[in-house]
Image: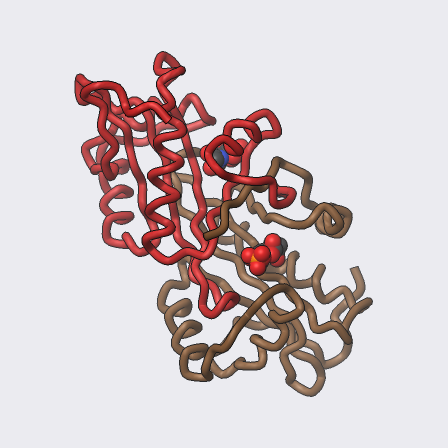
Chain colours: A red, B brown
Amino acid sequence: LKQLPEGYKIRPMEPTDYSVLKILEVLTTVGSISEEQFSLQVEEWKLNDRIYNPLVVTNNNDDVVACGMLFVEFKLIHELGKVGHIEDIAVRSDQQGLQLGKHLILALTEIARSKGCYKVILDCDEKNVGFYQKCGYSVAGVEMSIRF
Amino acid sequence: LKQLPEGYKIRPMEPTDYSVLKILEVLTTVGSISEEQFSLQVEEWKLNDRIYNPLVVTNNNDDVVACGMLFVEFKLIHELGKVGHIEDIAVRSDQQGLQLGKHLILALTEIARSKGCYKVILDCDEKNVGFYQKCGYSVAGVEMSIRF
Ligand SMILES: CC(=O)N[C@@H]1[C@@H](O)[C@H](O)[C@@H](COP(=O)(O)O)O[C@@H]1O
Ligand SMILES: CC(=O)N[C@@H]1[C@@H](O)[C@H](O)[C@@H](COP(=O)(O)O)O[C@@H]1O
C-alpha cells in the first residue's frame, strides 16, 4: 500500500465537516440536510463514540475528499462479542487512484480491532468484491434487504 | 402466515431471559456468560432502546424458544436516514415448522418501519435466501468480513 499523498490526513469526522455531504452523493441519495442538522448528528455520534467512529480523509488543502464509518455492535454471542460494521464509504470522484478507499478501510478495520471486535463486516455490490478482498476481506454471505 | 401456536407470545427480551443463551448456541459460539453479565447486557440495551430492540418468542410454558435482534443505525445519507439491522436470529431446534422465525422477522421488520427506518438489512447464508425471500426480503449485495 502506497502512503497517503503528501499533506493528506485521516482523522475523525468533525461537526464542521459539512462538505462530507457532497462526497456522500457519490454513494447514494443524501437529500437536504442543514449545516446545523449535520453538526448535531456528528456531535451525537461523538457522545456515542463506543458505537460510532466516523473518519474523513483530507487533502493538502484541508478539504474533505473521502469519508467512512465504523460502528460497533454489542452482542451476546462470542462471549458478549463486538462486531464492527463498515458503512458509507465514499471517495470524491476526482481522487481515484490514490488508494484513499483502501487507507480508509484499513484505518476503520484497525479501530475495530483495537476496540476488541471479533470481526468486521460490510455489505457491497458484487463489482466491489475484488477491492475489499485486496483490503483483507472475504466473501461471508448474502446481504438481503427490504425497503419501505 | 399461520398464527403463533396457542399460548406462544412475542415480547421484548428481559434481563431474566438467561435461557436465550442456550438458544443462541443453535446459531454460533456463545461461550461462557454469567447470569449477571447477561442481565447487565440486556439492561444496557434497554437503556439504549433507540438502537437495540431484542425480541424473544415464548411457548405455552413461558420458556424462551426463539430470539432475534433489530438494531437501528443513524446515518447521514437519505436525509439523516435510519437503517434497521436484523441480527442473531435463532430458533430452538425442537420448534421447527411453527414459523417462529418468520414471525420474529416480521415483528422486527415492523419495529424498524415504526421507528422510521428507510430499509432493513440482514446477512445470511446462501442456503437461507429462500426463507428470507418468503419474509419479503430481496438479495441486495454481498456480505464481506474479516476476522481477528
Ligand atoms: C461498504 C459500504 O460503504 N457499503 C454501503 C453502505 O454502507 C451504504 O449504507 C449503502 C447505501 O445504499 P442505499 O442508499 O441503497 O441504502 O451502500 C453500500 O452498501
Ligand atoms: C440474520 C442473522 O441472524 N444473521 C446472523 C448474524 O446476525 C450473526 O451475527 C452471525 C453470527 O455468525 P458468526 O458467529 O460467524 O459471527 O450469523 C448470521 O449471519
Q: Quadrant of the N terminus of chain A?
A: top left
Q: Position of residue B81 (x, y in %)?
A: 43, 40
Q: Position of residue A117 (x, y in %)?
A: 41, 56
Does B82 appear above or below A30?
A: below
Furthest residue in direction bottom, as rendered:
B61
Furthest residue in direction top, as rendered:
A94
Task: Tell me the quarter of the picture where residue A6 sits.
Answer: top left
Q: Position of residue B102 (x, y in %)?
A: 71, 59
Quadrant observed for ligand 2 in the rendered image:
bottom right
Q: Position of residue B130 (x, y in %)?
A: 77, 47
| Whether residue A65 is visible | yes
Left or right? Give the position of A53 relative to B89: left
| Whether residue A147 is visible | no
Question: Who's the residue at 43% across and 61% down the image?
Answer: A74
Does A85 appear above or below B103?
A: above
Q: Quadrant of the C terminus of chain A?
A: top right
Question: Who's the residue at 26% across and 24% down the image?
Answer: A64
Q: B24 or B71, which is in the foreground?
A: B24
Question: Who's the residue at 47% across and 77% down the image?
Answer: B33
Does A40 appear above or below B88?
A: above
Q: A79 or A40, which is in the foreground?
A: A79
Q: A89 or A42, which is in the foreground?
A: A89
Question: Who's the residue at 53% across and 45% down the image?
Answer: B145
Furthest residue in direction front, as rendered:
A1
Left or right? Give the position of B34 relative to B97: left
Task: Tell me the quarter of the picture where residue A57 sits.
Answer: top left
